[in-house]
């Protein structure tokens, strides 16, 4: 399944500046594995040592938070859009 | 009413909405890039009482994006909340603009939030945001999260127990080193302005009661990459420690004195809650022997060879020249007394 993944600004250094990439994956977990294969280092920004999604990063499939779907096991279909949305703290004054 | 003529004729506001704004009390937490834009919108829109809370004083690098400040304010060494209030009173003398120069912490946040009609987020760290979130959820006050860095930013409104709260959406704050920081990523005025204006629009809707128009989504925008996304936020998350379990961990966290590192500023803030107000003139006399001292009614500044200490009447101090809390506490102890 070929899906589009929206890369937030803070992670674009890992994707060579790309704001959107296309990867194959039948599930969100597979999608992340594919991202890691193409852009090493991105996985640990998304998942912790236990393999769980980091709690300050949200993943959305077609605008729906995967926490309310099947989490990392959420199935994907061709044409789906995955958005990675990290918490933003903002700058100092 | 001539002042608000162009706003009143907007169908979403009308005479009734304008009256609700006049009767409303908003709290703007933080008066930097986000906060100045937020406060500016609210005061010009005629919100009857706007309280601006900020712990900090002005620096020249603020002027690039903090729209309420100018060189005259800088020359007078004003705290941001005070400078903002003075400027906004000249913009709209019909409303009350109340500056509070203080650190938002577990000791004072509830008193500041309770009874207010909306809280606007102009802060720069998650610890304060979780604190605001807990206070707002506990007291049933709607608030609008907003944050910007580099050329991107994000915002969403929170109506306690109706929409996801901050902890529903971001269960944990990013640990240090995981996301861009202020000293590496910079910040563009249009980015923070765009986010703050969106947040201010949500505040106006909340204040006039236009709940059907609330943007129940996380907005992410990037003015350099030319993106704008809305991600729908559903309902509060079952089991959320804040809005479902009511475990107010941040509200009950702090007891005695504590330090806060000011991001990118080589400065540590020392907060000592519960101290009697410091008479800055008397302190200035005691400190003259230590180095050049200047003071006004808002703050005192002591220049040491390697550090600069700024003291506020509420006994809070900003120790510039170190990022080591122990060093900051030692200096505080030595010159002010712990």
Image (cartoon, coloured by chain):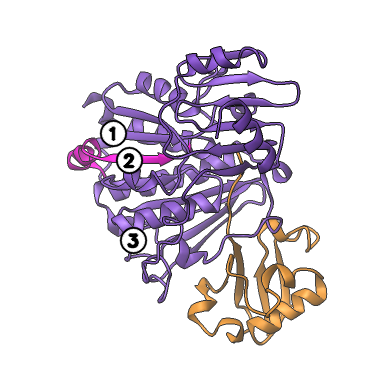
Chain colours: A orange, B purple
Disc 1 with disc 3 on a shared chain: yes
Q: Who's the residue at 47% across and 33% down the image?
A: B36
Q: Position of residue B284 (x, y in %)?
A: 55, 15
- Distance between the alpha carbons at the discs numbered 1 and 2: 6 Å
Q: Residue B49's mark?
A: 1
Q: Position of residue B26 (x, y in %)?
A: 32, 40
Q: Position of residue B66 (x, y in %)?
A: 54, 31
User: Which of the pair B323/B329 is nearer the observer?
Assistant: B329
Q: Residue B103's mark?
A: none
Report the side of B104 relative to B11 (left or right): right
Read off the magenta span.
Answer: B12-30
Disc 1 with disc 2 on a shared chain: yes
Q: In the rendered view, would you say B205 is above or below B84?
A: below
Disc 2 with disc 3 on a shared chain: yes
Pointer 3 residue: B160
Q: Residues within 10 Å of mark 2 (few under 14, many from 20)?
A: many
Among the two numbered marks 1 and 3 on one chain, the one whose residue lies closer to the N terminus: 1
Q: Is residue B132 visible?
A: yes
Q: Residue B26's mark?
A: 2
- Distance between the alpha carbons at the discs numbered 1 and 3: 22 Å
Q: Is residue B28 magenta?
A: yes
Picture quarter containing residue B212?
Answer: bottom left
Q: Secondary structure at mark 1?
A: strand
């Amino acid at each position: 399944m070929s899906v589009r993944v929206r890369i937030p600004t803070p992670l674009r250094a890992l994707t060579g500046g790309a704001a959107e990439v296309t990867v194959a994956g039948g599930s969100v977990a597979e999608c992340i594995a594919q991202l890691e294969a193409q852009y090493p280092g991105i996985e640990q920004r998304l998942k912790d040592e236990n393999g769980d999604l980091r709690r300050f990063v949200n993943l959305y499939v077609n605008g729906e938070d995967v926490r309310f779907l099947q989490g990392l096991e959420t199935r994907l279909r061709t044409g789906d859009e995955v958005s990675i949305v990290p918490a933003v703290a903002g700058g100092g004054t | 009413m001539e002042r608000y003529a162009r706003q009143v004729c907007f169908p979403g506001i009308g005479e009734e909405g304008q009256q609700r704004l006049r009767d409303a009390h908003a709290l703007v937490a933080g008066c930097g890039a986000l906060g100045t834009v937020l406060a500016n919108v609210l005061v010009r829109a005629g919100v009857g009482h706007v309280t601006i809370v900020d712990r900090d004083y002005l620096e020249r690098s603020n002027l690039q994006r903090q729209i309420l400040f100018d060189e005259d304010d800088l020359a007078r060494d004003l705290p941001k909340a005070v400078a903002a209030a003075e400027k906004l009173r000249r913009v709209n003398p019909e409303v009350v603009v109340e500056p509070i120069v203080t650190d938002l912490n577990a000791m004072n946040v509830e008193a500041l939030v309770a009874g207010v009609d909306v809280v606007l987020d102009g802060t720069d760290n998650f610890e304060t945001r979780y604190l605001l979130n807990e206070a707002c959820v506990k007291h049933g006050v709607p608030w609008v999260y907003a944050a910007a860095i580099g050329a991107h930013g994000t915002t969403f409104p929170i109506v306690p127990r109706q929409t996801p709260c901050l902890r529903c959406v971001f269960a944990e704050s990013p640990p240090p080193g995981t996301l861009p920081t202020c000293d590496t990523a910079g910040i563009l005025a249009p980015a923070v302005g765009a986010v703050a204006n969106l947040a201010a629009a949500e505040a106006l809707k909340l204040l006039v009661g236009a709940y059907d128009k609330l943007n129940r989504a996380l907005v992410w925008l990037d003015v350099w990459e030319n993106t704008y996304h809305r991600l729908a936020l559903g309902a509060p998350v079952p089991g959320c420690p804040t809005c479902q379990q009511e475990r107010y961990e941040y509200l009950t966290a702090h007891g005695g004195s504590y330090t806060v590192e000011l991001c990118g500023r080589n400065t540590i803030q020392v907060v000592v809650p519960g101290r009697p107000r410091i008479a800055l003139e008397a302190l200035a006399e005691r400190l003259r022997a230590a180095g050049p001292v200047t003071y006004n009614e808002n703050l005192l500044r002591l220049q040491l060879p390697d550090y600069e200490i700024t003291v506020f009447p509420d006994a809070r101090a900003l120790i510039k020249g170190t990022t080591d809390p122990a060093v900051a506490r030692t200096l505080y102890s030595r010159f002010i007394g712990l």
